[in-house]
Image (spheres, rainbow, N blue to C red):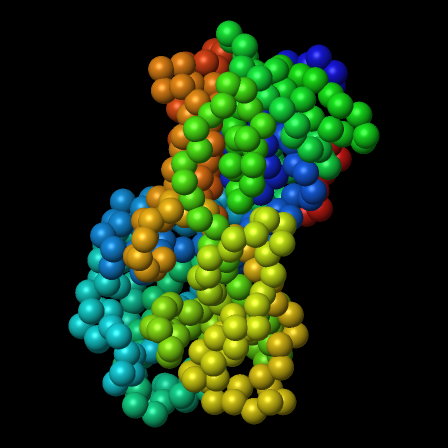
Amino acid sequence: MTNTSYDVLVIGGGIHGAGVAQAAAARGYSVLVLEQNQIAAGTSSRSSKLIHGGLRYLETGQLALVKECLFAREMLLKNAPELVKRQAFYIPIYKNSKRSILKVWLGLTLYGWLGGYNKNKRFKRIPRQQWDKLDGLDTDNLKAVYQYWDAQTDDKALTTAVMNSAIDLGAKLCMPAIFLFAFRKDDHYAVEYLHQGKTIHCKAKTVINAAGPWVNEVLGRTQPVIPQIQTQLIQGTHIILDGCITQGVYYAEAPSDKRPVFVMPWQDKTLVGTTETIHTGHPSDTKPTVAERTYLLEALSYYFPKYRSSQTARINAAFSGLRVLPQTHGNFNKRARDTLLDVDDKKDPRFLTIYGGKLTAYRITAENALDHLQKNLPISSEKSDLRTLKLKPGPLKPH
């Protein structure tokens, strides 16, 4: 691959890197992906495994983001039926809940309207006589339970499927490969990376930085220097326990601070998450803390009495991922979750960085990123329409 030229060079093999590679290859561009470890080795395999619109974002007025994610959810349900499954979600409302019955009803009404009403998007109130079927949910002081529909996935399997699709369309994947340096020339970037102990040089008309928590580290290896957006890394931890939740996903409030917490089925076990704590170390050093484990166990046992004994509340596994959020003051829960796309030169963009991003809306993010760089990409013939392109599960293909 020495002295090879590409239309699009992608740094990062998470869901956004895979999505950009797929979208660029589908448009007929030559693509190279550099991944330092394995596909979905970071946050893209450490999420809540949910494909959803973001119901809670309605409270902060992020209607456009919710509508975008709901549209993306429906596309994934249509194009990846073996990877993305529609799932029932339950919202229990207690006497001491932060959100009233009326507020939840209004939120679900707006959520359904933004997603376009049909039989799979309607919500309902669960009759009191059916509460005993809800996986042992505590009914003391329970006032109401609402059910609505979103979806669930295996995030690593989905990322792998998207990367396989990109490879099928002609993208090249180099892994493990360490990005070393990028220097802007008049009409391209000269790029250096390390692969199998050798420093390799190539040219790229455009570069997309999809390195997730490592985006600013990547920017630090470019010349001329590209200004960085000030961000914070927010750690989200999940725990896995024995005892399968069977009815669906429970969307509850943590008793200590009223943050949203999900209790959900995952591979015949119970998955609980997530937390939101500032991570100040290197992105590779993230790991669940004792405080986070305790916080999630308390939330689980608060709603499900069967987990109040030391025998049933034993954690089998825990994992942490990092979200990239703009650095602002105040409650994390109230921060905007829009994906930020930043370029090296607004008049003549050749290097684009993806800050943040949602698993659900990866395809929209990828196409928006390419649109930002369109003026510096060659005329090409589209190979495939992502709106109808199917995704299949399976191991990573040879690359």
Is residue 133 visible to the viewer in this orientation of the structure? no
Task: Point out residue 83 in the picture as x, y percentages from the top left corner.
Answer: 56, 52
Name the residue rendered at 51%, 36% in the picture. Answer: 216
Answer with the quarter of the image where residue 239 lies: bottom right
Name the residue rendered at 51%, 7% in the picture. Answer: 186
Left or right: residue 291 compared with residue 176: left
Name the residue rendered at 63%, 20% in the picture. Answer: 191
Q: How many marks?
A: 0
Answer with the quarter of the image where residue 176 lies: top right
Task: Point out residue 301 in the picture as x, y percentages from the top left corner.
Answer: 48, 84
Q: Quick one: 32 or 121, which is closer to the camera?
A: 32
> Relative to 6, does residue 256 appear above or below in the rendering?
below
Task: Name the residue furthest top.
Answer: 186
> Relative to 101, does residue 176 appear above or below in the rendering?
above
Name the residue rendered at 48%, 50% in the picture. Answer: 233
Task: Point out residue 52 in the picture as x, y percentages from the top left corner.
Answer: 40, 55
Q: Quadrant of the N terminus?
A: top right
Left or right: residue 152 compared with residue 3: left
Q: Quadrant of the C terminus?
A: top right
Q: Quick one: 217 or 121, which is closer to the camera?
A: 217
Is residue 230 visible to the viewer in this orientation of the structure? yes
Q: Quick one: 283 or 96, which is closer to the camera?
A: 283
Q: Quick one: 133 or 235, which is closer to the camera?
A: 235
